Image (cartoon, helix red, strand yellow):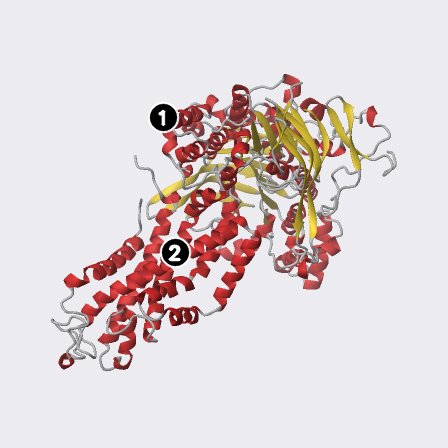
Amino acid sequence: MRFGFNFWLGAGLTALVIFAGVLAPWIAPFDPVLDADLMSSELPPDATFWFGTDAQGRDVYTRILYGAQISLTVGIVSQVINSIIGVTLGMTAGYWGGWWDDLVNGLTNVMLAIPSLIFALAVMAVLGPGLPSLLVALGLTNWSWTCRIARSSTLSLKSQGYVQAAQTLGYGDLRIMFTQILPNMLGPILVMATLGMGSAVLSEAALSFLGLGIQPPFPSWGSMLTDARQLIQLAPWVAIFPGLAIFLSVLGFNLLGDGLRDSLDPHMRTRKP
Amino acid sequence: MTAALLQVDDLHVRFPISGGGLLGKGRRMLHAVNGISFSLAKGECLSIVGESGCGKSTTALSILGLQEPTEGMIRYRGQPLAGPGAPGRMQRAKAVQMVFQDPYASLNPRQSVRTSLAAPLRLHGVTAASEIADRIEAMLANVGLTTEHANRYPHEFSGGQRQRIGIARALILEPEIVVLDEPVSALDVSIRAQIINLLLDLQEKLGLSYLMISHDLSVVEHMSDRVLVMYFGQVVEEGGWREIFEAPAHPYTRRLIAAIPDPEKALNSPAQENNVAYPSSLKGRSFVSDGSATLDVFSAPPPSELIDIAPTHKVRVALPLAAETW
Amino acid sequence: MTAPLLDIRDLHLGVALGRSAHHPLLKGVTFQIMPGEAYGLVGESGSGKSVTSLAVMGLLKKPLAVSGGEILFKGQSLLALPKRQMRRLRGNRIAMIFQEPMTALNPLSTVGRQIAEMFVLHQGKSWGEAQKLAVEALRNVRVPHPDRRAKNYPHQMSGGLRQRVMIAMALACNPDLLIADEPTTALDVTVQAEVLRLIKELCAERGTAVLFISHDLGVIASICQRVGVMYAGCLVEENETRALFDTPRHDYTRGLLGALPRLGSRSQHGRQRLIDIDSIIADRSKLTETRFIAPRGAEGSKP
């Protein structure tokens, strides 16, 4: 497979986030929670504190490394849940049609009508704060667009000759959906998921800010950013670095998705000699 | 005459069309197929010709089980192939297969040729890897490809080669009947001859029965044993290829034949089209339509009957009461 | 001898790939169309017949570019013409009809208005006058109830009617040249026959020259006086229609003619195996080395 520059840039940024998260315990110079020291609070970046320190005197660099764990988990897990729900509902609705299609369409429209943050808030209110309920809440809120894309792709793919051929060859409905339809709509679904990863990271920040997400003192980029709200003029680095981390990781996810879509397109695939 | 392999009796297909009115008020029925009957014998090529919207594709889809008939019976070797008591997809797959018109849309771009040929075999209980490989190799040889081609993906092939792969896929389960849906009309002119020759060779070699859907009458004349002419969901004329092309009896058939852009005809004498007299057995009868006016697809067609004018030649005429003589 | 209306001389055209690479699509195409003549270009997909017409219309899009040769229309070089003047020519002196009329018509405007626009744009007529002329134009292409049809939107018409509207638009300003690119391929055979007859009769009546592009030899034969056969970016054979069909001289032309079943040949000769073009042509890459261009008015070609 051949990948373009954008793919490699996206893969590089994503890899950076993964490395940061996975290797945080070994490469972080401090502890993200325990090494609070009010004497060294709000220090600008220097040789010891690369990204400076926050109001409690904790190393921003360390907290960003640990925050990557949260962002990655939230981004990936919530999008996996979203995609599974969206694709299953959308594909079966598009393929079978009838009352099932009407039902799924109605459900999708209801989901789209409720602001996703409000819905996530409601779920969080029921489940209580914390990472697991955050994952469930974000996983249940954003599947409607994926569902719509899966449904419309299925509708157009259903009329393709090879899907009809599979029917005449005796394939069952589920087999047709998984071998003939799903592989041919992975591109847009993947793009949706990567875009969703970015927005999940942002939603996590919002929920954490409202006190329903990651509970302090554990670091997540969103909560760091909201903590930095009051300090933005005094100690801009406290806001800049988590913001930069969010920006670069969202950019990385998107470029990765675009690049993957291009390379998954079989027209770009060349046969090995 | 051999017993019919496929027997279609009084097939009707109607689709509900929402007329745009609120609460489904404007719901109307689109009459796609209005009672057609025919039989297909072993080793025969029967062509259904007609223009877009005449119901020829819907008829084919019904036989393939991709479209549920509203009324009527489709039997394969005496057993129902559609409706209640019909076999599932698995049994039907071994009876009828299809070659599609567009070789670019009919192959899954994400499956190699080997996968798209091996999967149906596995599904139908062929498990031994060596047998699968042998059958794929034999089938590729049949359609003029080599085993080397098996590992490639559809986009690496030309249109003609793709159509060969489509034919291989249709034949891999060894069906007796193959539906050919405009098998060459999407191909380049110089490739058409190769595919037509291949289809005729395979028919002879494997004893296949073809049901061909086409609007290209020169291809139909070349390949068919018998021809059905369809117009607005009905058969307006049925007969052997010679009867249809040498002595067309229905005005619509004549219009169709006259409309073919044939170089010989265009260069010689374009005017001698409908000069052949109508057969004497049709004296006193009239036709519902000659195909020049549009019929209403939202209601059943006007009453008419299919009458014999020769042992194998039938023509649709208006019921004697319904119209004056011509 | 009269001067040619359209004179294409050694036209080279290709896709620019990067800075220096260049993938040729036309490798030196030369032909002339006389005033009032119907000239057919026949070829398969990728033979270069459609890009030839786009080059004449000045409608080549970015990676495509003319790399050599001349296109002269009434002695004037179209390639050197400024964009503004080319636009004035297009639709006015040179008109074009396409395979799929639905994509060429504006879905948000009535067909009457779209035809009227041609008169306003190119002949400076007032809208009121143009509307009347539009109805007249629809009548000329034998659209039943032209005054009512003029108020229709494209989607309310059948494919055959839409193609008639396209023809009405194309012929609105009495162009000198009509380019028809597979105008009947998407139509049913009986409708195709009607549209072909219409193009033939209207152009003969008005003395409009036609460049007719098709993959269908039968269609070409029914409309054109002279035919050019294109293969891989080259005009490999050109002759009067009659002579080309009777005595094809190029292997490729022979292959094309033999590859198609002819109506009535089975009745006369029984079912004969169709000629597989690849069996008579050993090496397709050598096909463009020989060319047979018959001179105009040569022996064997009746007027």
Q: Residues within 10 Å of mark 2 (few under 14, many from 20)?
A: many
- Amino acid type shown at disc 1: Ser
Chain assignment, label 2: A
Dividing the image into 4 quarters, which one contains the N terminus of chain B?
top right
- Image-based side of B48 in relation to B192, left or right: right
Question: Which residue position is annotated with label 1?
Answer: B130
- Amino acid type shown at disc 2: Val
Q: Which mark is residue A191?
A: 2
From the viewer's perspective, is residue C86 above or below residue A174? below
From the viewer's perspective, is residue A111 above or below residue B128? below
Where residue A141 sits: x, y (%)?
Answer: 42, 64
Cα distance, mark 2 to mark 1? 40 Å
Chain assignment, label 1: B
For label 2, the SS is: helix
Where residue B125 sits: x, y (%)?
Answer: 44, 31
Viewer-side residue, B124 vs B97: B124
From the viewer's perspective, is residue C104 above or below residue B268? below
Query: Is residue B261 something that shows in the picture?
Result: no
Residue situated furthest left in the rendering: A47
Dividing the image into 4 quarters, which one contains the C terminus of chain B?
top right
For label 1, the SS is: helix
Viewer-side residue, C30 vs C22: C22
Mark in the foreground, 2 or 1: 1
Viewer-side residue, A118 vs C65: A118
Q: Residues within 10 Å of mark 1 (few under 14, many from 20)?
A: few
The image quarter containing residue A224 is bottom left
Where residue B174 sits: x, y (%)?
Answer: 50, 26
The image quarter containing residue B19 is bottom right
Query: Is residue A91 something that shows in the picture?
Result: yes
Where residue B184 sits: x, y (%)?
Answer: 55, 32
From the viewer's perspective, is residue C88 above or below residue B316? below
Q: Are marks 2 and 1 in contact (CB under 8 Å)?
A: no
